[in-house]
């Protein structure tokens, strides 16, 4: 029988790594009533079918903080320790600020806890502070302290650089937004369950959406839902219009006899990584929906467009500038693919050749997988991808090398 003492000691050691006082301080800074209201909203939305899983992922930081504040009787995970450490960094930074700076931080926290916003931007800021100080830079949060257009002022050996922290959703590079897709599947699922009860079998509904499908366009969701339901009720094989081409066929994939997990894996191999997939089962009956836009997804191009607007607006041009881009709403497979296929590097280097990038000495990229402290192959080993602008006058300055030297 295994001895419990070492495990208990390890548990205590890991729990000691969580700064619970910092978590409580963050909640107090946000306002306890506002925090409780926000967590109730998130919890209610997180219970709603497939859409709920998206909510859980988007608000993982808030849910993790609340879970850790409850002192769970288990060792914290790597992600939990990383989130707690960033919360501690953010609260330590608050202590460095003047009352005006603290007021701006409270304003940003209040914004983060409303509508579809999250704590990711503030935790990205905390991560940049932590990382640059770890590289022996002096870091001043001038965006909070002085309401400067850029977020951080880095100083080292007489050299200064401006750093902008920005978050871009990968949804901006997709014709069909994942949030919209999950909302549609939650809407249609009860109808499919009823239809399968009277039409047992295995079916595949393929959807091509030339105009895409965005989460904000609830009218388009409702229209598409109605068309699918009408198509099934009338037992039509196809329905075509300018904004959607629908075709219903028997499901004949080799993995159709497998369980849902095997079926989804087979569908993913068949339709490719950009397809949006859904499986509804009723007994032995199965209804699969597969959708895609006409244009291929291009998340890196969306990032390039964002940087082109960001650099002139938020960098002063009086110092070398760094754009620290956080790519949100990507899954593991997609993030690995963007890196392995050098798509992020391609678009970043293309951006660095544009006039809008004259003040930019480097671009960095990060995702939740780095923020949450995950290792390879999910995350970049150094915590971020870096792309240096070789044409910038400060590109070869040794004092800036740790922050701007290309990582690939």
Image (cartoon, rainbow, N blue to C red):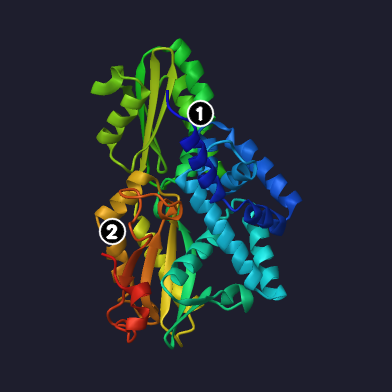
Q: Residue at x 62, y 41 (%)?
A: 71
Place of residue 402 in the rendered image (x, y in percent of width and height, measured from the top left): 35, 74
Q: Is residue 162 above or below residue 341?
A: below
Task: Tell me the quadrant of the picture where the N terminus can be found.
Answer: top left
Choose the circle earlier in sequence order: 1 or 2. Answer: 1
Q: Residues within 10 Å of mark 1 (few under 14, many from 20)?
A: some
**Based on the displayed image, in which of its 4 quarters is residue 358 positioned?**
bottom left
Residue designated by label 1: 188
Q: Residues within 10 Å of mark 2 (few under 14, many from 20)?
A: some
Q: Residue at x 34, y 20 (%)?
A: 259
Residue designated by label 2: 343
In the rendering, which numbered label is found on residue 290? none
Q: Nearer the viewer, residue 309 or 407?
A: 407
Q: Is residue 381 above or below residue 269?
A: below
Place of residue 35 in the rendered image (x, y in percent of width and height, measured from the top left): 69, 49
Left or right: 285 as drawn, with respect to 188: left
Q: Residue furthest right?
A: 33
Assign a secondary structure to mark 2.
helix
Gap in Å between the C-alphas at discs 1 and 2?
Answer: 35 Å
Q: Nearer the viewer, residue 208 or 356?
A: 356
């Amino acid at each position: 029988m295994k001895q419990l003492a070492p495990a208990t000691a390890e548990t205590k050691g890991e729990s000691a790594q969580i700064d619970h006082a910092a978590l409580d301080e963050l909640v107090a800074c946000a306002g306890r009533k506002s925090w409780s209201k926000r967590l109730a909203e998130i919890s209610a939305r997180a219970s709603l079918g497939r859409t709920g899983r998206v909510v859980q992922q988007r608000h993982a930081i808030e849910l993790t903080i609340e879970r850790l504040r409850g002192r769970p009787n288990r060792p914290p995970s790597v992600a939990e320790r990383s989130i707690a450490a960033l919360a501690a960094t953010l609260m330590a930074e608050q202590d460095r600020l003047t009352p005006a700076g603290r007021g701006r931080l409270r304003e940003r926290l209040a914004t983060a806890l409303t509508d579809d916003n999250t704590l990711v931007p503030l935790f990205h800021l905390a991560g940049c502070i932590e990382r640059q100080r770890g590289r022996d830079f002096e870091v001043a949060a001038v965006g909070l302290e002085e309401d400067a257009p850029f977020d951080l002022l880095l100083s080292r050996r007489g050299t200064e650089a401006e750093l902008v922290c920005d978050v871009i959703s990968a949804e901006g590079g997709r014709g069909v937004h994942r949030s919209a897709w999950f909302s549609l599947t939650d809407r249609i699922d009860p109808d499919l369950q009823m239809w399968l009860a009277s039409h047992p079998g295995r079916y595949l509904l393929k959807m091509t959406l030339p105009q895409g499908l965005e989460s904000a366009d609830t009218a388009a969701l409702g229209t598409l839902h109605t068309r699918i339901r009408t198509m099934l009720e009338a037992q039509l094989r196809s329905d075509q219009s300018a904004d959607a081409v629908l075709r219903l066929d028997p499901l004949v994939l080799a993995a159709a006899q497998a369980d849902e997990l095997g079926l989804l894996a087979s569908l993913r191999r068949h339709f490719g990584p950009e397809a949006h997939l859904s499986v509804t089962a009723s007994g032995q009956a199965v209804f699969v929906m597969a959708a895609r836009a006409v244009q291929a997804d291009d998340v890196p191009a969306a990032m390039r467009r964002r940087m082109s607007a960001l650099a002139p607006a938020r960098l002063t041009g009086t110092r070398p500038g760094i754009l620290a881009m956080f790519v949100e709403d990507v899954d593991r497979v997609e993030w690995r693919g963007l890196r392995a296929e050098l798509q992020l590097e391609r678009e970043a280097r293309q951006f660095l050749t544009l006039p809008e990038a004259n003040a930019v000495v480097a671009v960095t990229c990060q995702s939740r997988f780095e923020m949450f402290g995950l290792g390879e192959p999910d995350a970049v080993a150094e915590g971020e991808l870096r792309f240096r602008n070789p044409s910038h006058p400060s590109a070869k300055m040794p004092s800036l090398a740790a922050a701007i030297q290309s990582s690939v």
